Amino acid sequence: MTGKKISSPAQKFIQKLGIQYPVIGGPMYPCSNPELVAAVSAAGGLGVMQPISLTYVHGHDFREGIRLMRKLTDKPIGMNALIEKSSRRYQRRMSEWIDIAIEEGIRFFVTSLGKPDWVARRVHAVNGLVYHDVTEMKWAKIGLDNGADGLICVNNRAGGHAGPKGIQQLYDELQSLDVPLVCAGGIGDSNGYHQALNIGYAACQLGTRFIASRECLASKVYKQAILDAEEADIVLSERITGIPVSVINTDYIKRSGLKSGWLARWMLSGNRTKHWMRTIYALKAIWQLKKSSLDESGNRDFWQAGKSVAGIDSIHSCESIIQDLVHSQESHSI
């Protein structure tokens, strides 16, 4: 990025965060093991850890997990904070994790599923940054009104909880807010990366591409499924969390179907019952996704992925992946 104009959104982004490239390794449950997060940061991007993945899936004490990443790289890393109102125990645990992360020097936070005001107060007190996950203007305004410094713009090509709008459409809707916008979804190769930056995004957040990396501890069969999948193989299932989630259309998904059952739909439609249904879904998904992501037998073919699978045909190190993304950078105007 050396020598690029300071007015470029991407240039401002990397200078503000102290990183080399406008690339974020998206936080993923269950695939964000600490070695992967650290490798993305060491390669010049910004790895963002997912705390439940760090502790529950990969078995690290939260503070010691951060310190492990610090041993692997001295580059900046971030943290994902899911702040939707849930059980008091979960809210208390997330609050504790945020405090520990700040104590350990984390200064970039990605908030999801709630109002980030209380997170922003703590993070801004140490001169950190908070970016909020959004899928449309409504949630963007809520995030910015509650202290967010930038937006992770989740489009309809993303893995996991995808948004309803396309990359260009979402940018056009949000650009008037005059804050950094990060393209999240559908970026798996250099062409997609440069197209997003040329649109005006300040950075790109990648998830699926980094699952198919050497440093990710996901099973070989999961990674191979990503290599084998085409865009048409990515479908939206409501049976994981009650909200459409992008997954590979495996035999398990075909057997299970894509729509929630009538009882789940009824509970999700009620103000008093939707919390309980979401909790049931979450507990089930946490267990299933953990088992399926690490299972080498391939019998648990329950795998999240986005439409970027179309541009992923090999497994490389995170350093190689990032270099491939930015390789033709000099011939593009950002």
Image (tube, grey):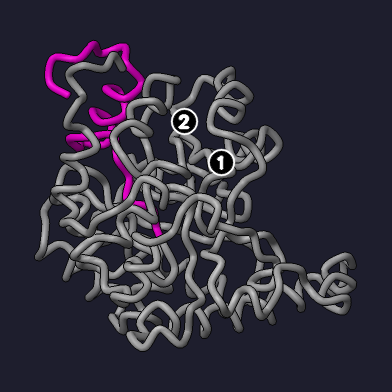
**Labels in figure, total:** 2
Residue at 66% across / 80% down in the picture?
255
Image mark for residue 100 = none
The residue where tag 2 is placed is 181
68 versus 318 height, above or below: below
209 versus 188 height, above or below: below
Q: Is residue 255 left or right of residue 24?
A: right
Q: Amino acid at mark 1?
A: Asn
Residue 8 picture quarter: top left
The residue where tag 1 is placed is 155
Q: Is residue 263 left or right of residue 332?
A: right
Q: Residue 245 versus residue 83: which sits nearer the camera?
A: 245
Residue 125 in view in this figure: no
Q: CA distance from mark 1 to mark 2?
A: 12 Å
Q: For mark 2, give the secondary structure.
A: strand
Residue 55, position in %: x, y? 36, 78
Residue 296 picture quarter: bottom left
Residue 10, position in %: x, y? 31, 25
Q: Residue 94 versus residue 236: which sits nearer the camera?
A: 236
Q: Residues within 10 Å of mark 1 (few under 14, many from 20)?
A: many
Q: Please give the range of residues in magenta.
A: 1-27
Residue 261, position in %: x, y? 82, 76
Based on the picture, tell me whether residue 36 belongs to the magenta stretch: no
170 versus 45 height, above or below: above
Q: For mark 1, give the secondary structure.
A: loop
Residue 185 in view in this figure: yes
Q: Quadrant of the C terminus?
A: top left
Q: Residues within 10 Å of mark 2 (few under 14, many from 20)?
A: many
